[in-house]
Image (cartoon, rainbow, N blue to C red):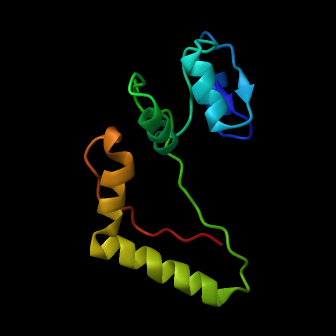
Amino acid sequence: MRRRGTTSLNRLSQITPPPVIMSVVTWADCLVALQQRQVDAVSTDDSILAGLMSQDPYLHIIGPNMSDEPYGIGIKLENTDLVRYVNRTLERIRRDGTWNALYRKWLSVLGPAPAPPSAKYRD
């Protein structure tokens, strides 16, 4: 199962034998379909799976990650003040321990907190 508009579909199509895919609109729809046994699994990134797991103690993440995809923040290029503000805030969060605290609060079901990711910029 996957939520519409996600990057999971391409990865799922590479599995042999190919799974039967059910697409839904929201992550809540994924959770309900899983709980009602309409599907056997949900495919998405770990942070979303952690959120689903926090709502149902019977859910577990199994198997290795299927991919490693970066997160991004999109800001208009001409909005340089906002770009600088966001970059400073992200750097502070990495440096002052906030990143680790947020990871422990929201993603601890994924295991110990890894080191904060380094900044990567794209045009």
Q: Residue furthest left?
A: 112
**Quadrant of residue 123 in the image?**
bottom right
The residue lying toward the viewer, choosing from 7 and 112, is 112
Q: Residue at x 73, y 77 (%)?
A: 76
Q: Residue at x 61, y 15 (%)?
A: 39
Examine the rendered structure and indicate whether residue 63 appears above or below residue 121. above
- Where is residue 41 shown, x and y percent of the image? 54, 20
Examine the rendered structure and indicate whether residue 36 appears above or below residue 7. above
Q: Is residue 113 left or right of residue 12?
A: left
The residue lying toward the viewer, choosing from 50 and 84, is 50
Examine the rendered structure and indicate whether residue 82 appears above or below residue 112. below
**Quadrant of residue 57 in the image?**
top left
**Which quadrant: the N terminus?**
top right
Q: Residue at x 44, y 28 (%)?
A: 56
Q: Residue furthest top?
A: 17
Q: Residue at x 28, y 51 (%)?
A: 113
Residue 14 visible in image? no
- Where is residue 33 shown, x and y percent of the image? 63, 20
- Where is residue 72 shown, x and y percent of the image? 58, 62
Q: Is residue 55 left or right of residue 101?
A: right
The residue lying toward the viewer, choosing from 25 and 122, is 25
Q: Residue furthest bottom?
A: 81
- Where is residue 6 shown, x and y percent of the image? 68, 40
The residue lying toward the viewer, choosing from 27 and 55, is 55
Residue 40 visible in image? yes
